[in-house]
Image (cartoon, grey):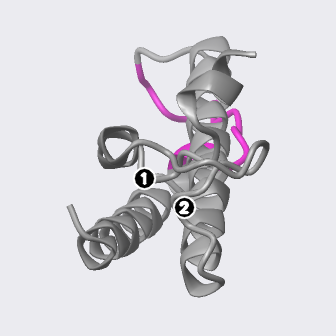
Amino acid sequence: MTISNIKTRIRNRLSELEVEDKSTRQDRATVTLDQQSVGRLSRMDAMQQQAMANAIHQRRQNERIRLKAALKRMEEGEYGYCLDCGEDISPRRLELDPTAALCITCAKR
C-alpha cells in the first residue's frame, strides 16, 4: 500500500468521523426531564445513553488526533519511521493501523 493510498484512507476516515459526530450531536445533548412525555426511557436511562454517546465521541476525538498526527508526519517526511528508535515501521503494521507511530518493538515496551 502506498503513502498516497494510506493518506486517502486517513482523509476518508476523518470525513466519516465528522459525519458520525454530526449525526450523534443530539445524543450528547443535555438530558431534560419532560413530565408531559410518555415514554419507556427513564431519566436515568437517558443519562446513561448520553454518557455512552459522550464516551464514543471522545474515542472519535482521540482517533481524529491520531489521524491528523499521521498526516502531519507524512507532510514532514517522517511517516513510517518509529518516533522512539527511528527505525522503519513495518508496512504491514501501517496497513493495519495507518496511525501507528511506533515500530512493533518499541510499542511492546
Q: Of residues 26 and 20, which is closer to you in this image?
A: 20
**Numbered-mark total:** 2
What residue is pinned by disc 1? 98
- Which corner quadrant of the image does residue 11 belong to? bottom left
Number of the front mark, 2 or 1: 1
Image location of residue 22, percent across then percent down: 46, 66
Q: Nearer the viewer, residue 27 or 87?
A: 87
Q: CA distance from mark 2 to mark 1?
A: 8 Å
Q: Quadrant of residue 104?
A: top right
Residue span colored magenta: 27-39
At numbered mark 1, what does the secondary structure look like: helix, strand or loop? loop
Who's the residue at 44% across and 68% down the image?
A: 14
Relative to the observer, which residue lies in front, 70 or 76?
Answer: 76
70 lies above or below 60: below
Residue 34 in the image, given as x and y percentages of width and height: 63, 36
For mark 2, does the 10 Å Cα neighbourhood hold few (<14), some (14 to 19), or many (20 or more) residues? many
Image quadrant in which the C terminus is located: top right
Q: Disc 2 marks which residue?
A: 67
The residue depicted at 54 percent of the width and 77 percent of the height is: 74
Amino acid at dot 1:
Pro
Coordinates of residue 45 in the picture (x, y in percent): 57, 15
Contact? badges 2 and 1 (CB < 8 Å): yes
Mark closest to the chain's N terminus, 2 or 1: 2
